[in-house]
Image (cartoon, helix red, strand yellow):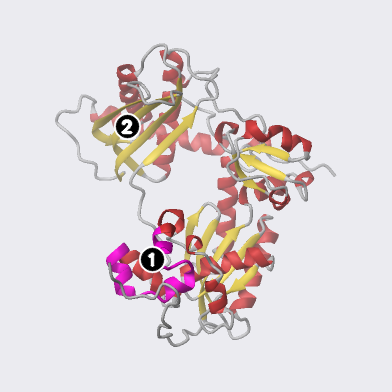
Amino acid sequence: MSFKTSPAEPAEPHRPEPRRAEASAVALVDCDNFYCSCERVFDPKLRRRPLVVLSNNDGCVISRSAEAKALDIPMGAPFFKIRRDLEKNGVAIRSSNYALYGDMSRRVQETLATFTPDLEAYSIDECFIGLTASAVESIDELGERIRQRVGQWTGIPVSVGLAPTKSLAKIATHQAKRSGSGVARLFVEDTDYEAVLRDTPIRKVWGVGHRLAPKFESVGIPTAWHLRGADEAWVQKQWGVTLARLVRELRGVPSFAIETNPPPKKAVAFTRSFGVPPESLEEMSEAVSAYVSKALRKLRKQRRKAGVLSLYLRTFDKERTAHSFASRTIELPVATDWTHEIARHALAALEEIYRPGVRYKKAGVILHDLRPTTGVQQSIFDDEAPARRLKGERLMQAVDIINQRHGAEIIQTASEGLEQRWQLRCAHRSPKYTSRWTDVLVVRC
């Protein structure tokens, strides 16, 4: 195999002219230890104390405060294995509270929107934004003001990376976290530009990750600096146009635009492990009904309807057997967001794949073939009267409004059951401070 690159030391590529670095930039705003930070906003006793947040079902560690990281608590560690060590070191423990985290993420994004409309919510704790300096404020000063305002308005500490491209902004954010400064810049004309890229392992480069890193390392590209110097045409031939654009991004040439209007999702899913495995078809039916209801609530929030439904069950068996994984996919007669209709199809599919005596670990509902709520094509083979379906969909809109005003699941379908023994374990969950009226903090003075 031959390629145009020098593994040991890449040839110095032509550096583009500076792109008015002090006039415009891409900023990546990354919330520090986001889940832990959300918990600390409403519980001051957790500040400066080691804190970990657990995954669904209190399974493993998914977020650690700086103090917990200093204790060498590994990310992803199973909770049951390290529980005694956590208690011994006085580590505070919280179950995941996604309603709280999602609402705090929304507040951070709304705060960032006061600086610019060019905002892309990359993940629950990261946002790309486009910035333009003014005559009285440089890009660096603007980055510092962003950090201060987000902290003051939401209580969430953030790190801000400033650069001419999204890929370099990602690296700059890592530098801001490592240095503890909170704000870092990485422009081609900066004196430390080369040193920072040489110090960035290839696996830390946005878009490469742990899967592709060994392949790059095997051909002599161990760092971001080496990838920057690689031949663009060769990279495109080996790994595709996306990674070729990444090479340009590392050279300071913008190739990934900020997506202010991301494309609609292709599927909506709700999957959970059981806290206590359902022991009968009736209990499993309750869980499936609840999962359908939650998935459709997310679907209606996106103003979409589903044309295809998938249901799956998974067991505790480590070895693959005939019953380890069972699923059914159903094409709905007409795309809809009516909970009653989709739950009916899901429960019919459940009766086909459920096996008595099998200890199920997890279930999931996935909605595919998503379409806009308007202009849905009808079917002559539809058994449901169109007027009845329209009435049902309007009923769902009313239920969503009531639940939004008075708290999630104030109204739910009877098929979801009342006891719900199968619900996730969440022995350490904090209140839903911002999304449930009964959990709103009361200040007495």
The amino acid on which the numbered mark 1 sits, given as a three-letter code, is Val
The residue shown at (42%, 15%) is: 358
Report the residue marked by disc 2: 310
The residue shown at (72%, 32%) is: 84
Q: Inspect the magenta stretch and tell me whether residue 249 lies in it.
A: no
Q: How many callouts does the rendering have? A: 2
Task: Estimate how packed mark 2 is, as few (under 14), some (14 to 19) or many (20 or more) residues with alpha carbons within 10 Å.
Answer: some
Which quadrant of the view contains residue 348? top left
Place of residue 106 in the rendered image (x, y in percent of width and height, measured from the top left)? 55, 52
Residue 240 appears in the picture as rendered: no
Q: Inspect the magenta stretch and tell me whether residue 218 lies in it.
A: yes
Q: Main secondary structure of the magenta part?
A: helix
User: Which residue reaches farthest right?
Assistant: 445
Place of residue 322 in the rendered image (x, y in percent of width and height, measured from the top left)? 32, 21
Task: Estimate how packed mark 1 is, as few (under 14), some (14 to 19) or many (20 or more) residues with alpha carbons within 10 Å.
Answer: few
User: Which residue reaches farthest bottom?
Assistant: 17
- Tell me the tag on residue 219: 1
The residue shown at (43%, 23%) is: 317
Question: Which span is picked out in magenta?
Answer: 215-239
How far is disc 2 from disc 1 in space, using C-alphas? Answer: 42 Å
Place of residue 181 in the rendered image (x, y in percent of width and height, measured from the top left)? 69, 68
Place of residue 248 in the rendered image (x, y in percent of width and height, measured from the top left)? 39, 74
State the residue in front, 31 or 380: 31
The amino acid on which the numbered mark 2 sits, given as a three-letter code, is Ser
Q: Nearer the viewer, mark 2 or mark 1?
A: 1
203 w.r.t. 441: above or below: below
Q: Quadrant of the N terminus?
A: bottom left
**SS assignment at label 2:** strand
Which quadrant of the view contains residue 182? bottom right
